[in-house]
Amino acid sequence: MSSETLTTRFNLQFVANLTNTLALETVSANPSISVVNNFSSGTDVNQANQIFADQRQLATLTSESINLMTFNGSLDPVGIAYQSLRVKALIVQNLNGTDSNIITVGMAGSGAWRAFFNGAASSSIYIPGGGALIAVAPGSIGWNLGGASGSNLGIFNASATAVATYNVCVLGSTG
């Protein structure tokens, strides 16, 4: 019997400082947004019990499909098979530094994960070089996997000249 536990802290901080120096004064705006989620081990609100993290590469104009339920048969870092039913957080980071080296996330064809893409199997998100997709759903449901929701996340290297290197991290739960 497994006694695996997972605790996760998601901390995203966005801080900006806009200033305009005028003749008689300097005007500024300082928006700040903090997104913090602490996940304990489990399957309910603010809980997760599966994590997949990997750095991957794709040759030019090629794609791969990652099954978010089983991660294509991979074992987690402590040797237990993945069996996720929900995604609580997803990060895909394009490590290529040039804007034109785009990776596309979505459109996995057969069994495409549709819950995140509002039910559309053909939807996708473009991530330019240096960019990232970061999504968090800490509720008890998160984004469903399997059945009508599908479970395959497509990643496509749209560059005809550069190999795509990207990080992918998925926080999930088994219930």
Image: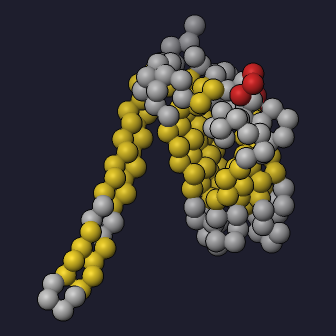
Residue 152, percent from left and from top: 75, 35
Residue 94, percent from left and from top: 63, 59
Residue in view at x 53 percent, y 37 percent: 89
Can you say which quadrant of the picture contains the C terminus?
Answer: top right
Residue in view at x 71 percent, y 28 percent: 149
Residue 91, percent from left and from top: 57, 46
Which picture quadrant has residue 90?
Answer: top right
Give the colouring mode of the picture: secondary structure
Q: Residue furthest bottom?
A: 23
Can you say which quadrant of the picture contains the N terminus?
Answer: top right
Height in image: 22 above or below 112? Answer: below
Height in image: 161 above or below 13? Answer: below
Which picture quadrant has residue 102?
Answer: bottom right
In-front residue for pair 120/155: 120
In-front residue for pair 51/133: 133
In-front residue for pair 134/118: 118
Say left or right for 71 vs 53: right
Residue in view at x 49 percent, y 39 percent: 136
Say left or right for 59 vs 25: right
- In this orientation, does residue 101 appear? yes
Height in image: 116 above or below 141? Answer: below
The count of marks equals 0
Which picture quadrant has residue 122?
Answer: top right
Residue 135, percent from left and from top: 53, 43
Residue in view at x 46 percent, y 31 percent: 138
Q: Residue furthest left?
A: 24
Say left or right for 45 vs 151: left
- In this orientation, does residue 74 appear? no
